[in-house]
């Protein structure tokens, strides 16, 4: 299994600041909760990676690329 393997799993994701000055990505699925905390600089890097992946996905096309 890898990043290209499709699955029929639903999950909820929330992203926001914590009261400790961290950025939290919170994933919940099938009764499992995964809180991931990042320094703001790390969150900026993650955001850049997401934007780069979106650009690459658009270049590939596929069912969502245009």
Image: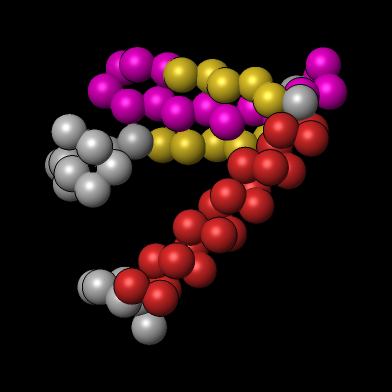
Locate residue 35 relative to residue 4 in the image: left or right: right
Which residue is at a point 55% across and 60% down the rendered structure image? 52
Residue numbers of the magenta segment: 19-33
Residue 3: name its quadrant: top left
Query: Against 15, is 20 above or below?
Result: above
Q: How many marks?
A: 0
Residue 5: name its quadrant: top left
Quarter of the picture containing the C terminus is bottom left
Locate residue 59 relative to residue 8 in the image: left or right: right
Locate residue 48 relative to residue 33 in the image: left or right: right
Nearest the eye: 6 or 19? 6
Residue 62 on image: x %, y %: 25, 73
Q: Magenta span has 24?
A: yes
Magenta part, dominant SS: strand
Which residue is at a point 70% across and 37% down the rendered structure image? 43
Residue 29 on image: x %, y %: 32, 27
Quarter of the picture containing the N terminus is top left
Locate residue 47 relative to residue 2 in the image: left or right: right
Residue 19 on image: x %, y %: 81, 19
Residue 63 on image: x %, y %: 24, 73
Nearest the eye: 29 or 22? 22
Residue 9: name its quadrant: top left
Query: Against 46, is 62 above or below?
Result: below
Q: Residue furthest bottom?
A: 66
The answer to whether one can see residue 32 in this image is yes
Which residue is at a point 31% across and 17% down the rendered structure image? 31
Which residue is at a point 41% across and 73% down the rendered structure image? 58
Q: Magenta span has 12?
A: no
Query: Against 59, is 42 above or below?
Result: above
Query: Against 19, is 47 above or below?
Result: below
The answer to whether one can see residue 17 in this image is no
């Amino acid at each position: 299994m890898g990043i290209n393997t499709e699955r029929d799993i639903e999950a909820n994701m929330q992203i926001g600041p914590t009261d400790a000055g961290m950025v939290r990505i919170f994933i919940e699925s099938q009764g499992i909760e995964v809180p991931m905390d990042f320094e703001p600089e790390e969150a900026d890097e993650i955001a850049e990676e997401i934007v780069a992946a979106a650009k690459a996905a658009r270049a590939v096309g596929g069912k969502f690329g245009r």
